[in-house]
Every structure is written in structure tokens, then in C-alpha cells.
Image (cartoon, grey):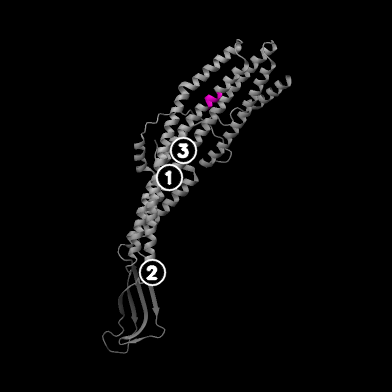
Amino acid sequence: MKICRILLILLIGLIAPLGYLYAEETITLGSLIDEALNNNPKIKVVYSEWKAAEYKARYVRGLPDPMASYGYFGESVETGVGPQENKYGVSQKIPFPGKLGLKGKAQAKLASILEEKYEAAKREIIKDVKFLYYDIFWVDKAIKITEEEKAIIEGLEKVAQRKYESNLTPQQDVIKAQVELSKLIDKLFLLKQNRKSLEAKANRLLNRPRGKELGKTSDVESVEFTYELDELHRISDESSQQLLASKLDIERAEYERSLARLNYLPDFTFGIDYTEIGSGSTTQPNDGDDAWMGKVSINVPIWFGKLNAQVKEKKALLESSKKNHEDAENVVDYEVEDLYFKIATYGDIVSLYKTALVPQAEQAYDAAKTSYETGKVDFLNWLDSERVLLQTRLAYYKAIVDYQKSIAYLERVVGRDL
């Protein structure tokens, strides 16, 4: 019996100095979101891709570089006014009207798609940070509640010990209290280990140094969710990055199909050549005068098999973009409805725990405690009521976390804060 008490004291002494394994500074959800948006590498990658596409949209509609040429006559060609010595030329290719404009529009749509993907990446990080924050909040609450329960069991064990020493209760009650206390200590170790794992995940999301500790979370309240399903569908149609990107992809594909059709039409090249003429042997007034020549050329798009294949390719890609948009609409509609009903259910569960289950568990525990101290119930009834109270309190905060997570996920789906 004394050995058991010594081991129990050692376990308590081992865990008590640990306390919370994180800094006491309180962290807020808003500060973590701001830090993640400013520092997360994934967001910076998508941002750079978007900006690169924007820069490209500025130059794809520009004309090709002009061509300059020079020729030297190794064997001069004699003309009526003198020998040809040097020839200079410059030319500019001009695509058929409309081609460059369509290229620019298609690239601009691609840049807009990447902008929506950038916004989607931010919404995804915000969702991940909220999930992480709510998980840490639950762990913090679980640690606090478990430590409070541990204190209760310690008091219960002392009561059982006094009754045992007075021959009012069997030794088995004391042993059961000690076993229950050991279980709570084990639970605390696991919870604190879990928090360390969540801190490592936070450091990855926030791009913090490895091993940096995270402060304790502030309280999370289950704010009433007032949106109706039809309103959520309307919001998702207007602001969902997934839907907006798929719509823009259809427009981009339409521009590219139109551009492929214009490839049946020729491009033009305009130029001018200037030829230096040496002094001749005539007495004509124009003896040795230089010559120049304007020129124009076109390419001849006669390989219709290649051109037809290009048009069919772009038409197939356009159809693919349309079907992708339909699929995106179906996915978003399903997720909105699924999350809406989950939020409603979790809200009812939170209300049930807050107004009924937690108060009832507390009353049952207080009644069992008083009855045990007066000898009206046995030790197991008190122990069971304590377990029920612990589980009910933990379940209450878990319901709050599930409720808030569902709202955070819905915000990611509809593309804006709710």
C-alpha cells in the first residue's frame, strides 16, 4: 500500500513541474492568420506565378522583332549606272489583324485564373490555420480540464484513504482512486505530446523556426450562424475562387479556339532594301546613284491537315473547360449544402451540451460526492460520476471545435469570410 502511494507521488511530482509545455503568452486567431498570409512559402509561390503571367500578358500581344539584313557583293553586279557594292534591308512581320489581340486576351485570362488560384491558396491557408488553432484550443481545454479532474481525484483519493484508515471503506476504493489518477496522468502526457505535434505543424504553416513554442489560445465562442442555404449558394456563385477560375478558363479556351481559326489566314511581312551603287563609267546624271526597293511577303497556310487538327484541339479543350466548370459547380453546391447541415447539427449539439448535458453532469457529480462523503453511495458511483463529468466537458469543447471548423471549411468553399 505504501509502495503504491510512493509511486503515485512520484508520478504526480514528475508531471506537475511540466505544467503547460508552452509559453503563457496568449495567441489570437487573427494574428496567426496574418502571420501565415505574410510568411507562408506556398502563398508566395502562387503569387509569383500570378505576377509572372501578368507580365507575360503585357508582351505577348507585341509585334515580333524587326529583321535587319546586310549583303556584300563579292562579285559586283554591273548595272547601267554603276556596280552594286552593298545591300541593306529591314523588314517587319505583321500577324493577320486580330491574332495578337487574341493572344493577349488569352494570356490575360490565364493571369486572372492564376490570380483566383492565389486567392484560393490564401483561403486554404486561412482554413488550415483555423483548423490548427481550434485543435490547439481543444487540446488546451483538455489539458486544463484533465488537470482539474486530476486535482479532484487527488482529493477523492485522500477522502478514501481517511475512510480506509477509519475502517469505513475497503482498501479497494483507495486503489481504484490511485488507478484513476494514473490514467489521468497518462492522458496528460499524451495531450501535451499532441500539442507539441500541433506546434510543429504551426511552425510549418507560419514558416517559423523549428522548435518555436506557441502561446496558449484564447477562448473560442460558438457564434450563432445566421446564413440561409440559398444565400450561401448565391455567395458561392459570386466569390468561390474555384468557380471563378473555371469560368475564366472557359473564356481563355474560347479565345484560343478563335486564334486557331485565324491561323488559316496569312501573316504579312513588309520591308525595304537599300543598295549602294558604285561610280559608273557613263556620263549620265544618275551615274552611281543608289537604289532602293520596297517589298511585301505573306506566308501561305496550305497545310490544312495541321490547321484542322489545331482547331479541333482547341475545340476539345474548350469543351473540357465547360465540363470542368459544371463539375466545379456540382462540387461547390454539394459542399455548401453538406457543410450547412453540419453547422446546423453541431450548433444544436453545442447548445444541448451548454444548456443541459454539462449542467446535469455537474449536478450528478456534486450529488454523488455528497452522498459518498455521507456514506449513502459507494465509491464506484462517485468515480463514475467523475468520469461522466470529464467526458461531458471534453465533448462540449469538441463540439465547439467541430462547429467552428465546419464554418471555416465553408468559408474556404464560398471564398470569403462569413
Answer with left or right where residue 347 lies relative to residue 201: left
What kind of element bears circle 3? Answer: helix
For the question of whether residue 221 can be seen, the reply is no
The reply to whether discs 1 and 3 touch (Cβ–Cβ < 8 Å) is no
Residue 120, labelled with which disc? 1
In the foreground, 390 or 18 = 390
Q: Which residues are magenta?
A: 390-394
* Residue type indicated by callout 2: Gly
Vertical placement of 202 versus 291: above or below?
A: above
Mark-to-mark CA distance, 1 and 3: 14 Å
Q: Which residue has dot 3 on it? A: 33
In the picture provided, is 252 more to the left or to the right than 203?
Answer: left
Magenta stretch containing residue 240, yes or no? no
Crowd tier of the residue under label 1, counting other residues whose Cα lies within 10 Å: few below 14, some 14–19, many 20 or above: many
Percent of width and height locating residue 186 = 63, 29
Residue 250: image x %, image y %?
A: 36, 53
Label 2 vs label 3, nearer the camera: 2
Quarter in which the C terminus is drawn: top left
Residue 205 location, x and y as percent?
51, 41
Q: Nearest the camera: 182 or 328?
A: 328
Q: Specify the amino acid type for callout 3.
A: Ile
Residue at x 31%, y 66% (from the top left corner): 96
Q: Mark 3 or mark 1, which is nearer the start of the sequence?
A: 3
